[in-house]
Structure formats: C-alpha cells, structure tokens
Amino acid sequence: MNTANDTVKTRETPVSVDWKVLAELGLLARINHEILHPLGYSAFYVVETGVSPGALVSESGGWEFTPEQLMKSSSLPPPSDTLWRLLTNGYSYEYIQQLNEESADEARLLIDRAIKNWRQICGEVSATIGGADD
C-alpha cells in the first residue's frame, strides 16, 4: 500500500553562483567575447557584491581590444610556443607577442583562433574525463 510519503518527490533548491564566480571560471569573459561584445554589449559585475547591474552599451556598436589587452585575458592558453603553434596553425606565442601595431588585426585573429581552439580542446577533455565515471 502506498502512503503519501511514497509518492511525494522532494525538490532540491537549485545551486546558484554569482557573477564573480562566473568571472573566476572564465565564463564572463567568454560570454562577453563570443556573444555580447560583437553586439555592442559588455556584461559586468560589482566585485564587492558579485551582483551584476546589467551590461554596458558601446556607443560605437562594438567592443574591440588591442592585442596587448587580449594577451592578458584569463581565457588565454598557457604561453607555450609549441601549444600556440598547434592552436594557431604554426604561429608561436613569441611571434604573436612581437606583432606591432600595424599587424594588430593579424594578432587579434591569431589570438582569437588560439582561444577558440583552446576552449574546444578543454571542453573535449572535460567531457572525456566527466564521461569516464559513467
């Protein structure tokens, strides 16, 4: 015989994280870089509270960063010349760092390629490791 306790399902309270945690995980940078910046928005949060009041809106319609700024990104792969050659189809980390202002577009392209490929590799490794226990 079933009792009321047998048929009642408990609901777990969803775990939530604030924007500071998302930033520490590199997700805020990824959301901004891949989704919001091309559309002219930039999500941000108050460091002291971890709360986001919204997104900044670019007056020029987009967010563009110098190669120097991109090279300081938390999403960047480790500075191994071998790894960067793999991720950028032959260009070393040192080469990209030495590109001058006239080559800023090439540098941005190579850095974006490295970040994209690095994220793909990390995601595949994570999925493989996560699926190993299944």
Image (cartoon, rainbow, N blue to C red):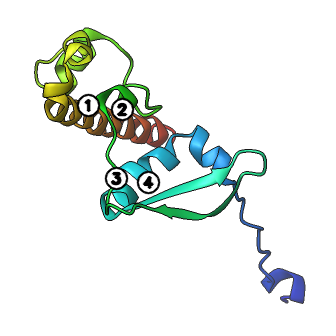
Q: Which residue is denoted by mark 2 in the rendering? A: 70
Q: Quadrant of residue 69?
A: top left
Counting residues from the start of the chain, the first of labels 2 and 3 encountered is 3
Is residue 49 toward the left or the right of residue 55 in the image? Answer: right
Q: Earlier in the sequence, mark 1 or mark 2?
A: 2
Residue on which the image places disc 1 = 111
Viewer-closest of 123 and 46: 46
Q: Which of 1 and 127 is in front in this view?
A: 127
Q: In which quarter of the image is residue 67?
A: top left
Circles 3 and 4: CB distance less than 8 Å?
yes
> Looking at the image, which residue is at 37% across and 49% down?
33
Residue 73 percent location from the top left of the image: 43, 31
User: How many numbered marks, from 0 up?
Assistant: 4
Query: Where does the image place residue 58, in percent across and percent down from the top left?
Result: 40, 61
CB of mark 3 within 8 Å of CB of mark 1? no
Tell me which amino acid carries mark 3. Answer: Glu
Q: What residue type is labelled 2?
A: Leu
Instruction: Tell me the residue that label 4 is attached to.
Output: 31
According to the picture, the residue beneath numbered tag 3 turns out to be: 34
**126 lies left or right of 22:** left
